[in-house]
Image (spheres, rainbow, N blue to C red):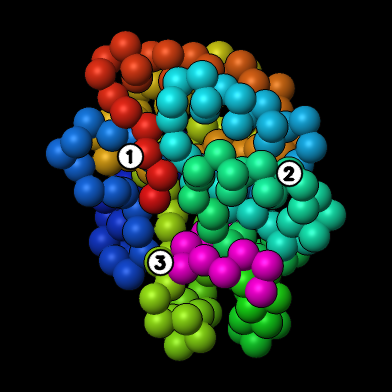
Amino acid sequence: MYLVKTPWWLKKLYPQLIWNAEPGNRSIFLTFDDGPIPIVTPFVLNILKKYDARATFFCIGDNVSKHPDVFEEVKQAGHSIGNHTYNHLRGWDTDDQVYLQNYLKANELLNTPLFRPPYGRIKRSQIKLLQQARPDIQIIMWDVLSGDFDMSLKREEALKNVTKNAGDGSIVLFHDSIKAFHKMEYALPLVLEHFTRLGFTFKAL
């Protein structure tokens, strides 16, 4: 069970988290979780380049260690980098100090103020620890979830999730992962085409 469009009340419950970017410029903020991954991440980079789009990649530290060349491609293409922990830890099920150390281990490779908790699951106590460890941290959530990770979802539905719900200032979540590739590969180019036609630009956080 997940919400495609993040409801206003959830944003109010966690005002210290960033759910949307500032509206007013007809901009959409595409984000990609769980990379860098060979084949998948380079596919994303090529499609973004075609539309002169910038995005934000929330990277798993372990994947950066395994695929430093792909990580370098992301940076060289001018996209923003975010921390997604070293081992994709679910905050609700993880001891606070273990979570903090896993974040810090990833940050040694990533060195970025941007952070997204895997699964969007993070305790208030963990938020405080991260803010103490890195005062300039920005914890980025999302406004629209593509659902590309959902094995029961048709790829056309993943596309519709974004085109029907995203708008000015939306932070949209895709995944550059093997699991999501089939749906993301279909939906991403069509999302870029759709919103470009409507006069939107795609920016990095």
Label 2 sits on what residue type?
A: Val
Closer to the eye: label 1 or 2: 2
**Left or right, 184 with reference to 48:** right
Q: Secondary structure at mark 1?
A: loop
142, above or below 54, in the image:
below
Closer to the eye: label 1 or 3: 3
Numbered badge on residue 170: 1
Outermost residue, left side: 24
Q: Residues within 10 Å of mark 3 (few under 14, many from 20)?
A: some
163, above or below 203, in the image:
above
Spatial CA distance of label 1 from label 2 is: 27 Å
Q: Position of residue 71 (x, y in %)?
A: 69, 49
Q: Is residue 89 magenta?
A: no
> Disc 2 marks which residue?
70
Label 1 sits on what residue type?
A: Ser
Q: Quadrant of residue 83?
A: bottom right
Spatial CA distance of label 2 from label 3 is: 24 Å
Outermost residue, front side: 76
Q: Quadrant of residue 40?
A: top right
Label 3 sits on what residue type?
A: Gln
Nearest to N terminus: mark 1 or mark 2: 2
Q: Are marks 2 and 3 in contact (CB under 8 Å)?
A: no
Instruction: Tell me if residue 13 can be seen.
Output: yes
> Disc 3 marks which residue?
138
Nearest to N terminus: mark 2 or mark 3: 2
Region in magenta: 108-118
Q: Quadrant of the N terminus?
A: top right
48, above or below 1, in the image:
above
**Left or right, 176 with reference to 161:** right
